[in-house]
Image (spheres, grey):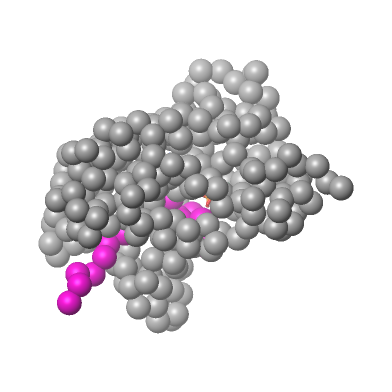
Amino acid sequence: MTAQKLALIMGVANQRSIAWACVQSFLSQNYDCILTYQSDRFEKSIQKLIEQQKINNSPGRILGAVPCNVECEKAIPLLLQADIPHLLADRHRPFDAIVHSIAYADMQDPRLSQTNWSIFSQALHISAYSFLQLTREVVEKDFVHISDGSTTGSHSSLISLTYLGAVRAVPNYQSMGPAKAALEATVRGLALEYGPTHQLHINAVSAGPIATAAAKGGIRSFSSLQQAVKETSPLRRHVKAEEVANVIRWLSESTGVTGQTIYVDAGYNSVVPIAL
Ligand code: NAD
C-alpha cells in the first residue's frame, strides 16, 4: 500500500482563497492536509470551513489548522517545531507538497513611486522572503523527502503563487510587482540550490486575476484587470481558483519541472492584449 501523501497549505483566509481551493484539490486526491492562516482573527471562520468540508466526504483528511504570521521571524520555525509535530503521529513525516499562498502590501496609495521603505520591505518580507525562509526551514528541520535522485522515488514539492505584475507593469499593483519579481527569482535560486542536494521541486504558479479578499480589497480597479482578461485572453474568460489549484496539485506530483513560473491565466500573458 502506498503511504498517504501529506500537504501543507499556507494562506487560507476564507472560502474564496486560492489556498482553500488547493485544500479541496488535495483532499479530493486523498491527501492529508495541514492548513495555516495568518492570525487568531481567522480561527473561527476557518474552523467553520473545516466543519463544512467534513460534510463533503472527501477522501483526504484535514489534520489541523494553525496560525502562522510570517511577518514574525519566529513564526515559521515555531510552526515546524511545535504546531505541526503536534498534529502528526509521526513527528517527521515529510511533506509531499507545500503551497505558499501568502502575500501582502499596504496599497492605500496605489502609486509605486510613493512607496516608502516600510511598505516596500513589508511587501517583500511577507510575499517573497517568507517563501525563502519556509523552504530553508522545512529542509533544515527534515520535513522533506530524502530523495535517492531517481525519478520514481518520492520528492517534496514547494509552490508559491505569483502574478503577471512580476514581469509586466500592472496599474495599481504598487510594491507587489517588485515583490512578485523577487519571489519568482527566489523560486529559481532555491530550485538551483536544493535540486542537487534534496531533489526539491520548487516552482511558482502565476494565476490570472481572481476575485479574492486580497485582490478585490487590495488592488484598486481590480475588476478592470479581470475585464481585460475576459476581452483579450485566448480563452476569453477569467480562470477560477479551482483551476489554479488543480494545476498546483498536478505540478506538485510532476517530476522534472523545477525553477519555473507556470501561467494559469487563460493564456493572457501570451498575447498582446488588444480587444478587437
Ligand atoms: P487571499 O486574501 O485569500 O489570500 C492571501 C493570504 O495571505 C490570506 O490568507 C492572508 O491572511 C495571507 N497573509 C497576508 N499577510 C500575511 C502574513 N503576514 N502572514 C501570514 N499570512 C498572511 O487572496 P488570494 O488571492 O487567494 O491570494 C493568495 C496568493 O495568490 C497571493 O500570493 C496572491 O498574490 C496570489 N495571487 C492572487 C491572484 C488573484 O487575482 N487573486 C492572482 C495571482 C496571484
Residue 238 point in image, percent of width and height = 68, 56
- Determine the residue positioned at 26% across, 40% down: 195
In this picture, residue 112 sits left or right of residue 253: right
Q: What secondary structure is the stretch in magenta mostly built from?
A: loop
**Is residue 267 inside the magenta stretch?**
no
Residue 14 shown in magenta: yes
- 201 up-or-down from 74: above or below: below
Q: Residue at x 52, y 24 (%)?
A: 120
Location of the N terminus by quadrant is bottom left
Residue 162 in view of the camera: yes
Outermost residue, right side: 276
Residue 50 as seen in the image, left or right of residue 200? right
Q: Is residue 36 visible?
A: no
* Relative vertical location of residue 190 with respect to residue 236 in this rendering, above or below: above
Q: Is residue 70 above or below residue 235?
A: above
The magenta segment is 1-19
Q: Residue at x 14, y 55 (%)?
A: 92
